[in-house]
Image (cartoon, grey):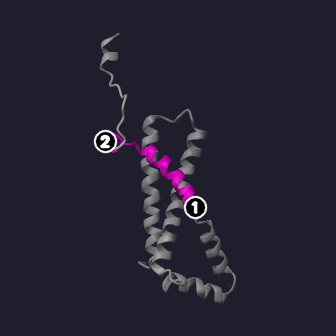
Amino acid sequence: MTELAKKRPEFRNINAFKDLTTYRMAPAAWVSILHRASGAIMFLLLPFVIWMFDTSVSSEISFGKFKAAFNAGLGFVPGWFIKLVALALIWAYMHHLIAGLRHLWMDVSHDAVTKEFGKTSAVFTLAVSIGLTLVLGAKLFGLY
């Protein structure tokens, strides 16, 4: 064996509580995990999206109920919680869209994809999705 092979660490018994908590994931790993999570969130909140669309376009009366749900609440659910769910949906859509475009770009230009491009595009994806969520969330909560 060479000296290089002898210096490599061996991981035989990985302690999930000690080792996995200190593991630092790359930004691309975060984008990949959050891409899957955002897809699941959008799927699970699909009835909420259908309800929002239906009540907002059916009539003027239902649109008034739609606005009242976001301001005063709906039944026992307070309005701030409905806004929070809508904010989660906004983040999920923004992140899923931008991460999907990132994946499409990497599929189209697979010759130009490098490790550095993966890192910078992942950081860009996280920054833009969070930035757009903050801007749209500020509008949702009436800050402008």
Real-space Cα distance between discs 2 and 1?
A: 33 Å
Residue at image location 34% in from the left, 38% down from the top: 15
In which quadrant of the rendered view does residue 65 lie? bottom right
State whether residue 91 is above or below residue 53: above
State whether residue 77 is above or below residue 87: below
Residue 67 inside the magenta-drawn segment:
no
Q: Nearer the viewer, residue 41 or 130?
A: 41
The residue wearing badge 1 is: 42
Q: Amino acid at mark 1?
A: Met
Residue at image location 48% in from the left, 52% down from the top: 34
Which SS type dominates the magenta stretch? Answer: helix
Residue 34 inside the magenta-drawn segment:
yes
Q: Quadrant of the N terminus?
A: top left
The boundaries of the magenta stretch are 19-43
Pick out the residue farthest to the right. Answer: 58
The residue wearing badge 2 is: 18
Report the side of 21 relative to 112 (left or right).
Answer: left
Report the side of 140 relative to 18 (left or right).
Answer: right
Residue 70 numbered mark, or none:
none
